[in-house]
Image (cartoon, grey):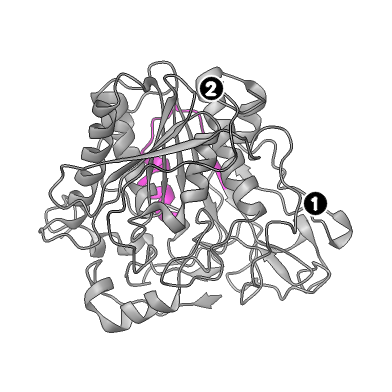
Amino acid sequence: MRVLSPSPRGLAAVLHDPTVFALVLAGVLACGSEPGQIAAGSSGSSSATDSSTSAGTPATSVDTLTSTTDGASTGHVDGTSGDATATAGDDGSSGDGTTGDDAPMCGPDPLPMPCDDAAALGPDDGYGNEVEIAIDVQAIDNPHPTAPGPIRIYRPTGVDDPPVLFFSHAFGATTPVPYYDETLRHLAGRGLAVVYVPYPLVPDVDDDNLDRYECLWTGFATAATAFADSLDLTRVGFVGHSFGGGATPEMARRAFVEQGWGAQGRFMFIMAPWYSWGEDYDTLPDDVRTVVQVYADDEANDHQIAVDDIWNRLPAGMEKAWLMVRTDVCDGCGLSAPHGVPMTGTGPAMNDQAVLNAVDRWAVWRRIDALATYAFEGDPSARAIAYGEDDEMGHWVGCGGRAVRALEHSTDTPILASCVAPLFTAAARCENADPSYPGCP
């Protein structure tokens, strides 16, 4: 088992503790109208136009929070211990003679340098591949007092009243460039309007987590009001990563239960979530199509957090799926599954795993594309892709063209791995709670 050395202090230590900040700078974390098009749009240049204003401060950390690591780690679902890592060979083997889906749950230690985007074949059926629709990016102010920058709305040009996707980023990624910009442009290219709201790192308030949630929601609601005449709020999705993944059910509850959004289709896509501080998730409508996606080599967030804080709190009748992404290796490079999988670019932390490659296209883009199509159009073939029944992750160009390791998926029992001792454990929840959070001393 690979072990990191987290600080026992709370979230504010990221900026105020020199040791933790050094970990941030070292890049400890994130070492990371064809089928599927939601709305018809006019064809345009593949290069997008950007009318956004320059505002906000580039993040100096990428979702690096602090925590203790007390509490038991979860075991591998394949029956192996937490030490079941493998050393990868150049032929794509895991080091023990197995390849692809026969390899252990965990990736090699250390994870190899990431493959470039040409190392594996991308999807070719409309989910996860490129669409040449020009994208316009607009920026408006967020009236929340601690907002660190403007709201950004990625819109497909020539598409009237597109469905809306509200994106909650990982801690520290207060500007979409470079972390998620390619993903947001891809989703807008599928015919969605995508709203990105930055929240503060360390707001000058007593309840940091609550303030970040309020900042996110104020931004989302402001965008919905500002563009009410040109967005379809009857078809709505919420997507989040890490801190933003933990925030996603609460954002969705406010939208779907309190505001009535998504009456013609709604979904949540939650990636590697941190703790979730919302309430009454059992009141979410059963028709919120939901996917929780975790990464086998996540060095930040214990998979048990996603179970306790989200999966087990959702309505029993909700149609949901759990997806596990695993590392695979070919010719010395990796399609790896650390915490930063959803990020396609690196910031000041210089995380060498945050690149655009087949993991992004197959595990993230393809599944969100398909989930949106299923939620908004009811397409059963899209459901199979979104929920992992179609578990394909593409094929290598090298290594004899073998298949990349498939997704693990379940619709009833979460799949867990303990490849790394994570910075944040389920047992440390109350150490990261706001002072006023009920149920924590």
The part of the image, by quadrant, that contains residue 70 is bottom left
What is the crowding at mark 1: few (fewer than 14 residues within 10 Å), some, or many (at least 20)? some
Would you say 26 lies left or right of 216 here? right
**Relative vertical location of residue 169 with respect to residue 390 in this rendering, above or below:** below
Q: Residue at x 45, y 19 (%)?
A: 160
Residue at coordinates 45% horizontally, 20% vertically from top-left? 265
Residue placed under numbered mark 1 in the picture: 403
Q: Residue at x 11, y 54 (%)?
A: 436
Residue 314 colored in magenta in the image = yes
Magenta-colored span: 304-323
| Image quadrant containing the C terminus | bottom left
Tag in front: 1 or 2: 2
**Which of the two residues, 71 or 5, is positioned nearer the viewer here?**
5
| Residue 388 position in % (x across, y down) | 63, 39
Q: Which residue extends farthest top? A: 264
Q: Which amino acid does label 2 sit on?
A: Ala
Q: Report the number of discs.
A: 2
What numbered label is drawn on residue 357?
A: none
Residue furthest right in the image = 400
Residue hosting label 2? 39
* Magenta-drawn stretch contains 393: no
**Picture coordinates of residue 113, whole percent (x, y):** 64, 72
- Could you tell me which residue is drawn at 80 percent across and 62 percent down? 99
Q: Quadrant of residue 83?
A: bottom right
Mark earlier in primary sequence (1, 2): 2
Mark 2 lies on a secondary structure that is loop
